């Protein structure tokens, strides 16, 4: 299988033109005409993930987060980014990322999280002007109202969250019906979630003052960046497996959260 065939399958679902201006999705290491035989799927490229690819004979690593964001001026093993890129090149391992294009494509990341929670009637939270079916985040409704603490505990279990940070509750007996979701860093969509009439907004990377922006009408819950985006592995696996049934795809056992929780 050539890398261009794998890239085409992924980009049919999540076109590169959907990525944010600052992003670096697509093929980062390797050439489109290179042949590959087995893919390893992970959230991030790390030294442990590259070692796993070497051990398992995978010659392409497909991740959600690009290993290179800022330009690299030299390759001399000064940090983990340089070491990962150097090792991938030496080992003949291609690196491909599907980041904000996977976040904003229809039925992408936030849709997956919403489905895992059990939301119905989902729609885009921040639609793109050029395509209202694409954009960041979703808002939907639960099949029936659910107690806020029961729901947060259920979310904690579903996504294996070490700790959920959440804002003040209007009441311990608060019932939630309408839920907004934005995977990854979603502070920029707080106002959109409020405008959509969400009772609860689930996202990650919230700052101190962000937790005051619910205006006593909406609870904000930060479930962690990695936890909210681990579903990328499932989405990428489904895309490739359905399009290329004879191509070997492996979910990384070393893709892990770099943040630890002291309980």
Image: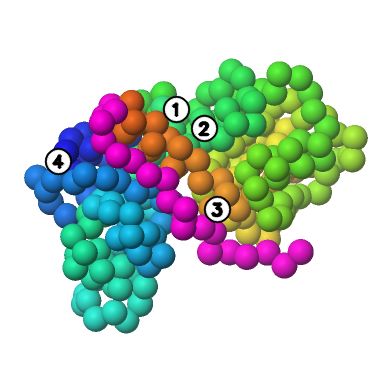
Q: Measuring 71% from the left and 18% from the top, which residue is drawn there?
A: 143
Q: Earlier in the sequence, mark 3 or mark 2?
A: 2
Left or right relative to 212: residue 53: left
Residue 193 lies in quadrant: top right
- Indicate whether residue 253 is drawn in magenta: yes
- Indicate whether residue 13 is drawn in magenta: no
Which type of secondary structure does the marked residue at label 1 adopt? loop
The mark lying in front, picked from 4 and 3, is: 4
- Label of residue 107 in the image: 1
User: In the rendering, at what x and y percent does residue 97 appear?
Assistant: 31, 49
The crowd level at tag 1 (other Cα within 10 Å; few <14, some 14-19, many 20+) is many
Q: Earlier in the sequence, mark 1 or mark 2?
A: 1
Q: CA distance from mark 1 to mark 2?
A: 7 Å
Q: CA distance from mark 2 to mark 4?
A: 28 Å
Q: CA distance from mark 1 to mark 3?
A: 19 Å
Q: Earlier in the sequence, mark 1 or mark 3?
A: 1
Q: CA distance from mark 3 to mark 2?
A: 15 Å
Quadrant for the C terminus, please. bottom right
The mark lying in front, picked from 2 and 4, is: 4
Reading the image, the residue beneath label 4 is 2
Which residue ends up furthest to the left in the rendered image?
33
The crowd level at tag 4 (other Cα within 10 Å; few <14, some 14-19, many 20+) is few
Which type of secondary structure does the marked residue at label 3 adopt? helix
Q: What segment carries the magenta color?
A: 243-263
The residue nearer to you, when weighing 206 against 83, is 83
User: In the rendering, at what x and y percent does residue 154 appear?
Assistant: 74, 38
Reading the image, the residue beneath label 3 is 225
State whether residue 45 is above or below residue 220: below
Q: State yes or no: discs 1 and 2 in contact (Cβ < 8 Å).
A: yes
Q: Earlier in the sequence, mark 4 or mark 3?
A: 4
């Amino acid at each position: 299988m050539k890398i261009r065939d794998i890239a085409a399958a992924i980009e049919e679902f999540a076109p590169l033109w959907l990525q944010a201006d600052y992003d670096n999705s697509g093929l980062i290491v390797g050439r489109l005409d290179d042949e590959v035989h087995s893919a390893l799927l992970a959230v991030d490229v790390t030294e442990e993930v590259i070692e796993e690819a070497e051990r398992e004979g995978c010659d392409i690593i497909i991740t959600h987060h690009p290993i290179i964001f800022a330009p690299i001026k030299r390759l001399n093993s000064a940090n983990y980014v340089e070491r990962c890129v150097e090792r991938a090149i030496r080992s003949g391992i291609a690196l491909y990322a599907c980041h904000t294009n996977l976040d904003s494509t229809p039925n992408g990341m936030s849709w997956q999280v919403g489905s895992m929670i059990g939301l119905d009637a989902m729609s885009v939270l921040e639609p793109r002007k050029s395509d209202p079916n694409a954009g960041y985040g979703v808002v939907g409704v639960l099949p029936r109202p659910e107690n806020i603490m029961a729901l947060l505990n259920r979310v904690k279990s579903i996504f294996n969250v070490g700790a959920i940070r959440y804002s003040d509750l209007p009441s311990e007996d608060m019932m939630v019906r309408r839920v907004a979701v934005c995977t990854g860093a979603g502070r920029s969509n707080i106002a959109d979630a409020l405008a959509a009439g969400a009772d609860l907004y689930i996202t990650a990377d919230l700052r101190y003052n962000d937790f005051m922006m619910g205006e006593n009408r909406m609870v904000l819950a930060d479930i962690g960046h990695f936890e909210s985006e681990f579903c990328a592995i499932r989405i990428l696996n489904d895309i490739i497996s359905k399009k290329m049934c004879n191509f070997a795809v492996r979910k990384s056992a070393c893709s892990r959260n770099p943040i630890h929780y002291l309980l």
